[in-house]
Image (cartoon, coloured by chain):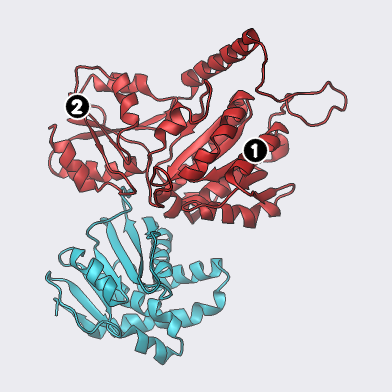
Chain colours: A cyan, B red
Amino acid sequence: MDQYSTIVSGFGGQGVILTGKIIARTGMEEGLEVTWLPSYGPEMRGGTANCTAIISSKLIGSPVVKEPSSLIAFNKPSLDKFGPSVQQDGVIVLNSSLIDDFSLDKSHKVVLLPVNELAKDLGNQKVINMVALGGWSKATGKLSLSALKKGMKLTLEESGKERFVDINQKALEKGYETAKEGIKASSV
Amino acid sequence: MGEKKLMRGNEAIAEAAIRAGCRNYFAYPITPQAELLQWMAEHMPEKENGTFLQAESEIGAISMVYGAASTGERTMTSSSSPGISLKQEGISYLAGSELPAVIVNIMRGGPGVGNIQPAQADYFQATKGGGHGDYRLIVLAPSTVPEAAELTFEAFNLADEYRNPVILLADGMIGQMMEPVELPSPVDTSDLQPKPWATTGTDGRDSNTIRSFAMGAEALKSINRDLQGKYENIKKAETRYEEIGVDDPDVLLVAFGTVARIARTTRRLAEEQGINLGIFRPITLWPFPGDRLAELSKKVDTVLTVEMNAGQMVEDVRLSVNSEINTPFYGEQGGVVPDPGRILQEVKKYV
């Protein structure tokens, strides 16, 4: 696989950092080269937190990308900041629970996922990030659902959070299944 | 070597230090190296005789390093640029007393308080002596997270071998980013070479004294001469670098640390445009691999230096290479990380 980069961005507390780590961790388990880079600048409360995860079959040079292959945007400021820089034909997973008004120029593959509602249906608002990541898996095809489930499980286990593995697996599945129906071929 | 772990640079450095047998760590928190301190706080007490101490200041921490290193135990401190400035007096004392210690600088933007973004603007400070007196530090510059772990481990060996402080010079990007790391196997501290000079108690022997003081001019001259002799030995034996595509490059790019890895992406972009970009990466910033660079520079018209500062290593590059060739510089400052495509624009000026 050529280098595939993903920016995950949202409000602090939406699980942005963990989502990127799970992409990197899963990529590593799949035998790929990976990097994960958080934004750690001075952030305002209510502002955006973001991270960049890269997976590649070759050695990764710069862990910073100007034009990511894909974007997971949990809020409007994130889409405004990173949406325009996503590569032509790249994937954008949008939290349509919070973003209802947007326009994009390039021919992006856009996935609208009402992650807040979907997570609520699952009974845990905190898993919105895994719902989105499930959708990302379906839309990008870069890491399979089963690989991501394993990467997520390992990541949670290492931080002593095994009790959340089940609900997060359900969230990944939910996002994946919902994205099957909801992928739009081009920008809206 | 064990299994691969996904780790932050700061964590990988801390864990590699523990595995190298470091049992004394003193520091004061500062971004972007806080995770290093956190890892040490969590894991150092798990080790037998492991000491983690958050000092009252950076100056306190480096002085504690002096004391602990005097006992011969492996000792480390870490900080980021402004904190490393505060440690300079202590570093000079360590060098003058020939104490082995490892100092980690996860560089951020300066001067002054600057910001918390990655920078390489402490090259002069690390390689030319930030403190007073004629001394040298071995300066190791990792370019990736796994290399940061590897060089940390190696830093302890070099410090012991030469009885000299070693600086691991990385930046906020390497400190903060995660990559897969294969950690070295832990050393058994009882297997380490004995240090007959250390202050370990006088049972059955005369007392040892650790000091950098010599009252008479001739006495201090002699100490200095010995130090310079040691530095010459280090130059001969420990100069390290990496070369990528340097056989017949159109342009030779010189970069260290973070910029060198970014330059690998530039090299790929250049290749797509039919440009052969060679990369020369000093791993030891002191001793600087100037002789090898001089040889390589004979094959090219341009040696382009790229750094995240206003032009510091480029001075050593210019001292090393033939004065007839171009030695341009491109740098970003203030925490801006250079973009691979932007570096390519610079390269193309000389093709």
Residue B302's label in the rendered image is: 2
Up-down: is B169 above or below B37?
A: above
Residue B79's label in the rendered image is: none
Q: Residue at x 48, y 55 (%)?
A: B7
Chain letter of the residue beneath label 2 in the structure image:
B
Residue B292, quarter of the rendered image: top left
Q: Say if labels 1 and 2 share a chain.
A: yes
Chain letter of the residue beneath label 1 in the structure image:
B
Disc 1: which residue: B63
Query: The C terminus of chain B lies in which quarter of the figure?
Result: top left
| Position of residue B114 measured from the top left corner of the image (x, y, whole percent) | 39, 48
Residue B96, quarter of the rendered image: top right
Up-down: is B257 above or below B33?
A: above
- For badge 1, the amino acid type reads Ser
Q: Nearer the viewer, residue B165 or A186?
A: B165
- The secondary structure type at the circle numbered 1 is helix
Left or right: where A84 falls relative to B236: left
Left or right: where B174 falls relative to B196: left
Left or right: where B339 falls relative to B283: left
